[in-house]
Amino acid sequence: MIPNSVIFGRGWLGFTAFAALAVTGQPCASQDSQAKSESESVVVHVQTDAPEPEAWVGQRLPFFVKLKAPGPFVGAAGFSVPSVARAFIVKVGSPVVSSETGDDDQDWTVQTHEFALFSQATGTVSIPDIQVRFSCRNGYTGPVSDHVETSRGIDVQIQTPDDYDPDVFIVSTRRLEVSQSWDPPPGDIRQGDLIRRTIQQSADDVAAMALAPPVLTAPENVRVYPDDPAVDDDMQRGNFTGRRTDVITYVPRQGGTVTLPAAKYVWWDPAQKQFGSTTLPAATYTVAAVANATTSGDSVSDESSGVAFTRWWALGLLIAVAGMGCIAVLTRRTLKSRLQQIWSRLYPPNRVAVGRLRRACRNNDPVAAEAAWQQWQNTLPGSPTVTPALRSAVTELHRRRYGNVDDATWDGSQLCRALTESLAASKDDADGSVDALPPLNPV
């Protein structure tokens, strides 16, 4: 975490350089204005389309985001996909690049990206606007221009089978294979022994995260500790085979007979238009009491984390002074561009997303927390370092959002604490990195 003093110092240097440019001349500003003008002159198009805008509850509904540019694309496109209540959106495979000629004989390079929606919400479901970031050339040899466009959302219809129970998590697939194992097997155990239940699911044309979460009910004298689910998507030529493995650990706190409940998994076969179900049987253990046995649970501290951004008054004063000194020599468009650059340096998008995620956790708001989590993921250049604790907290957030659990009771303190630990671990890894290159001119 970078201290506010460091951020403030960088901001001061940025404003000093900005004022110097305004007084001494405008070569950089002119070049930026020319580059921005060239970027704005390049016409591009983005569009969201669902060829089949109807699907069953829990069924994969494919939709596509199409990018059109007057020249080749440069680099990879980035997407900011807002969350959808009781739904899950996943990007599928790599983009398909093609070309087409418009009505005005304009040649276009087309990049088509496929997404899949899995929804437990029914009726009309709105796929929201998607922000797209990409770069392209103007013609085959023209300059590269950066673009941030918005692909307008669309509405799709999610159907429900007859006798549909909204309290049951439904997976729509041709087949769903479910199995379980117990360690140790049902029989005699001692008080305090661990009972591990492993549930494995496999389904065609369903993403692993769209498979049903496990039921975590248990007798009052048994503690339940779910592990992070292990998910695996085998994707070949656009077809999914999702696999999910859940491990639940039970700890009996008292002696006697303990029966751990059965688990029922239901799916809907769209081709046969009929339900299928698999019930994993219950397990009964005889627990031998242990004298002076004690049990303990996990405690969650209420430590508040994060550093609040301060000195708003100083930032406003510096912006006002810089604006008064430069308004006579800079156009409004150039001034806006400069201020946006300074603002992005002071408050990088990834840090803003982390702040929003922490606020959502403190307010115990799962909807805002999931949106902030996705925003943070989209601001990172690569795969972030995610600790097991953070992965577990995010899994619990998704279970609350998409499972058969009331998300009004979600406690964001675990996710907030795990996020702070993960950021600290990432910073330690960066500080501990060593330059592997030898000295250029060793003595």
Image: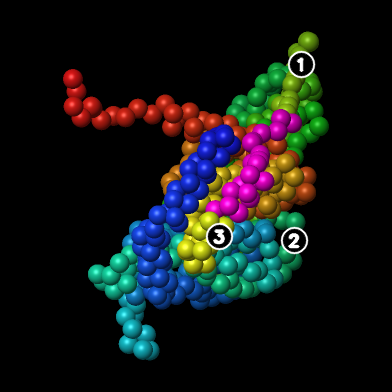
Q: Residues within 10 Å of mark 1 (few under 14, many from 20)?
A: few
Task: Tell me the residue at 52%/67% (across/down).
Answer: 332
Numbered mark located on residue 165 in the image = 2
Give the farthest residue toward the top: 291
Query: Which colour assignment does the render follow?
Result: rainbow
Element at badge 2?
loop
Q: Give, as a single range, the part of the protein colored magenta.
A: 302-322
Quick check: 375 above or below 39? above
Tell which circle, 1 or 2, labels the residue nearer the N-terminal end.
2
Give the residue at x 58% y 31%.
421
Q: Quadrant of the N terminus?
A: top right
Name the residue carrying label 1: 294
The residue closer to the viewer here, 17 or 381, is 17
Q: In this view, does 47 lie to the left or right of 163?
A: left
**62 or 13, which is in the foreground?**
13
Front in this rendered view, residue 309 or 251? 309
Q: Position of residue 166 (x, y in %)?
A: 74, 60
Horizontal arrangement in the rendering, residue 397 relative to residue 142 (left or right): right
Earlier along the polypeptide chain: callout 3 or callout 1?
3
Task: Tell me where residue 245 appears, x and y as whole percent.
Answer: 55, 42
Q: Where is residue 119 in the image (x, y as percent from the top left)?
A: 63, 62
Q: In which quarter of the image is residue 218?
A: top right
User: On the rendered structure, is 422 left or right of 298?
Assistant: left
Q: Name the residue under label 3.
A: 81
Quadrant of the frame with the C terminus? top left
Disc 3 to disc 2, C-alpha distance? 29 Å
Residue at x-position 54% and y-position 53%? 322
Whether residue 207 appears in this view of the structure is: no
Q: Residues within 10 Å of mark 3 (few under 14, many from 20)?
A: some
